[in-house]
Amino acid sequence: MEKLRLGVNIDHVATLRNARGAAWPDPLRAALLAEAAGADGITAHLREDRRHIRDADIEALMAGIGVPLNFECAATDEMAEIALRLRPHAVCLVPEKREERTTEGGLDVAADENRLAHYIAPLREVGCRVSMFIGHDERQIRASARIGASVIELHTGHYSELHAEGRPDEAEAELAALRRAATLAHSLGLEVHAGHGLTFENVTEIAAIPELRELNIGHFLIGEALFMGLGPAIEEMRRRMDAARA
Ligand code: PXP
């Protein structure tokens, strides 16, 4: 099986920084450390409310990191303007609600197909790889292919919750749905990524899905950094991902 790329999401370094309004911990420093520990890319979500990552962080990451930046954002005019100006390697479109603690579900591409097709066309023209963060629903996968997305990222949050709550049968059913979704997306020519809620405990089954090319992992790694350090946490995640595909 082809090696999986690991994208490290550094949003929550900014969460910690913003909790005190200080200049540290610095998300760019974390990104450089992640890169040195073997991350293949850095992911950062610029939310409309700027609750963690800020505009200046995105600019600093673009200028400072040596691996590709995956810019996560909602499909708004403001974010299109930023992405078209900065031209990150990848743009991952996610649904966003102000009241949510994290990205709770996938994007409803099927319900917004026309608008999203027009939204991503200029991003593709300037060379960004556009990704849709969606659930495993066949309609969303087919709509993503129709609008010209290069990539889908499958939302693994529900699987992660079922796993953590000790509901193995439901977790297995969710995993099976994710596997079917990856197969379908791959057959439609989409590159398949996955992420949300992944940990040392639940990453193996996800990483073993053959069609996947990339995982994006943040919250767990940043938390684990408190105990084992960010570099070792990333190395351990990498080891588990590689072992799952051996
Ligand atoms: N992928 C996407 C599209 C996300 O929105 C997030 C969370 O910001 C992640 C991956 C990473 O999720 P987590 O922080 O739970 O690892």
Image (cartoon, rainbow, N blue to C red):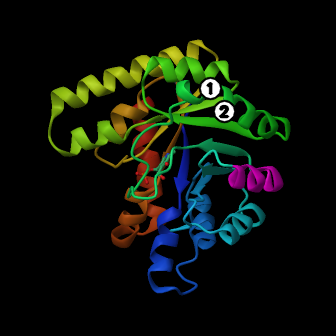
Which amino acid lies under the numbered mark 2 shown in the image of this protein? Leu
Quarter occupied by residue 105: top left
- Asked which secondary structure carries label 1, the reply is helix
Q: Is residue 67 visible?
A: no
Position of residue 151 measured from the top left corner of the image (x, y, whole percent): 62, 30
Q: Name the residue under label 2.
A: 116
Verify whether residue 79 appears in magenta.
yes
Q: Can residue 120 be seen in this view?
A: yes
- Residue drawn at x 52%, y 56% is 9
Disc 1 packing (10 Å; few <14; some 14–19; many ≥20): some
Position of residue 136 measured from the top left corner of the image (x, y, whole percent): 42, 25
- Comparing 217 with 136, the one in front is 136
Q: Name the residue under label 1.
A: 113
Disc 2 packing (10 Å; few <14; some 14–19; many ≥20): many
Q: Looking at mark 1, is its residue's CB closer than 8 Å to ligand 1?
A: no
Q: Residue 19 carries which label?
A: none
Position of residue 215 measured from the top left corner of the image (x, y, whole percent): 50, 41
Q: Main secondary structure of the magenta part?
A: helix
Which amino acid lies under the numbered mark 1 shown in the image of this protein? Glu
Q: Give the range drawn in magenta.
A: 77-87
- Comparing 174 with 217, the one in front is 174
- Residue drawn at x 32%, y 21% is 176
- Residue drawn at x 36%, y 42% is 157
- Asked which secondary structure carries label 2, the reply is helix
